Amino acid sequence: MTSAVLTGIGVSAGSAAGEVARMAPTPALPEPRALTEADVPAEVAAARDALRQVAADLERRAAAVAGEAADVLSAQALMVADPALSDQVEARIRSGSDGAHAITDAFGEFRAALQNAGGYFAERVADLDDLRDRSVASLLDLPMPGLPDPGHPYVLVAADLAPADTALLDPAQVLALVTERGGPTSHTAILAKTLGLPAVVGCDSAATLTDGSSVLVDGTAGAIHVDPSPQAVTEAAEREEHRRRRSESLHGPGRTADGHPVKLLVNLGASNELAAAAAADSEGVGLFRTEFLYLDRDRAPSAEEQIASYREVFTAFAGRRVVVRTLDAGADKPLPFATAADEQNPALGVRGLRTATRDPELLETQLAAIADASAGSGAEVWVMAPMVSVPREAAEFAERVRAHGLRSAGAMVEVPAAALRADGLARVCDFLSVGTNDLAQYAFAADRTLGGLAEFLDPWQPALLDLIRMAAEAGARQDRPVGVCGEAAADPALAVVLVGLGVTSLSAAPSCLSGVRTALAERTLEDCRHLAGIALAAPDATTARTKVLAETAS
Ligand code: PEP
Ligand code: MG
């Protein structure tokens, strides 16, 4: 008997078998209840009490964990304890709503404000929805939505995962992650990679999975086998064990089975990631996202502050390469002082390097700070610009970088025009780096923050691979290295394809490097080219992935 197979997008490699445990359901909102004048004080008190209890619960949970998880939970506790929120709830009860509806509507107002702010803020909407559901559950005395606790390790299945839950997720209890929604760049995908858990997202049919059902999750193939045979489970476990042993035995610079070198680098996006990034077995940083210094502020950080921060990173990577990406403000990374609030299409507006045309000082200060911090640090510092569209921009950027005494200037290939005319870019700068997250967004006209468009944002899309191939071939013609630093580089099977397309370095989350190193070590360069040909010839992303995986498994 063959078991049913549900398919989604595999976003974190590996496989695991176990019993499903679902997130507790969102509490259903009861029919509105009419209040009498006499009911109002008790209703207000109960609603305020529910908000207080949720805040206290989050604070308790924050105190029980450390690091980023504690920060996420404390921020959530602050949001729900905001007096503006409880005042709103009280006002709504006084004008006739019952407590549950007053809470829901008050959160709805805050939600709309965040959604309208767009980008990074709109992505925080899931946090508010989670707080609303917790507050309503607390008021109605229903089970708190959130992570299940079946008393044994389990495969976590959810419609989507809220940051408050993922922050608390215990990797010793969770075997794999499956979500109905979400795309390759979703919070779930990033978290799964960080924790090294197999994960499949964007799997609509996971809605049919119930608590206790037995599944085998294949995060490499993007498949969930329901009621797998004992033999399938054993074989998957053996493959995992082989993969684990193989990756533990491999160290050092990336190379294919026949010795073709592929630099393996890490992505670095926040100061609290520095220790893990520096400890990883890598040849350096392939993407240092400097935005973290600028976020949540109303003006740019001073030169001194930037120098201190960059120096910390460069010193940690002395003897290795650090590719610094200059400020990428706008669209999914809005900054009040650098991006216009009135653009109708911020993703198509003044963002990335274009910001520097409007505010040259911003880039000048940053380049001066990078140059200052790099002096004597021992790191090999390269600098690249985000969102380059035409060779003129790359040439002007390279000139400004070199004017600061920095030796290596590069352009990110994130816009289809840049890939189509990559020779022009490569001629005027020292290297190219393909940002597949944005390149997919612009190639498919699909907002990268919308989970519902995950199919288009799948990095296995053959049209995306065509654009990467163009950039890599241009780099080879102009004798310039071409790396990939988007999420695509983290997928071991796809990494092999990227090398076959001509990519010379791969940059990903530290936890993903050993999987990528192992996959490369198992293929010759010729194998990689053959697999790239198979992916390019496929009609769609799913076929490309399936055919390449079938070929590598044989
Ligand atoms: C990308 O777009 O692929 C990329 C690496 O940059 P970011 O995700 O920071 O926009
Ligand atoms: Mg980008």
Image: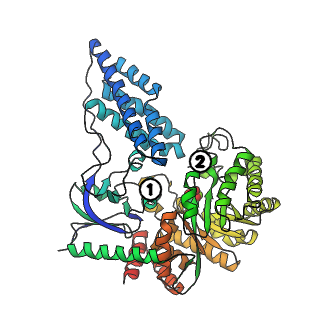
Q: Is 299 on the left or on the right of 261, as rendered?
A: right
Residue assigned mark 2:
346
**Residue beneath the point at 36% across and 24% down:** 48
Q: Ligand 1 closer than 8 Å to the CB at disc 1?
A: no
Q: Mark yes or no: residue 300 visible.
A: yes
For residue 227, side relative to residue 41 (left or right): left
Amino acid type of the residue that numbered disc 1 sits on in the rendered structure: Leu
Mark 2 CB in 8 Å range of ligand 1?
no
Of callouts 1 and 2, which one flags the residue occurring earlier in the amino acid sequence?
A: 1
Report the number of numbered marks: 2
* Residue 253 image point, x, y percent: 57, 76
- In the displayed structure, 85 sits above or below 433; it is above
Quadrant of residue 248 within the rendered picture: bottom left
Taking the image as drawn, is residue 388 in sight?
A: no
Helix, strand or loop under label 1: helix
Q: Quadrant of residue 204?
A: bottom left
Q: Residue 460 got which mark?
A: none
C-alpha span from label 1 to label 2: 27 Å
Q: Quadrant of the N terminus?
A: bottom left
Could you tell me residue 47's position as x and y percent?
33, 25
Residue underneath mark 1: 191
Q: Nearer the viewer, residue 448 or 337?
A: 337
Q: Residue furthest left?
A: 1
Q: Position of residue 28 (x, y in %)?
A: 27, 38
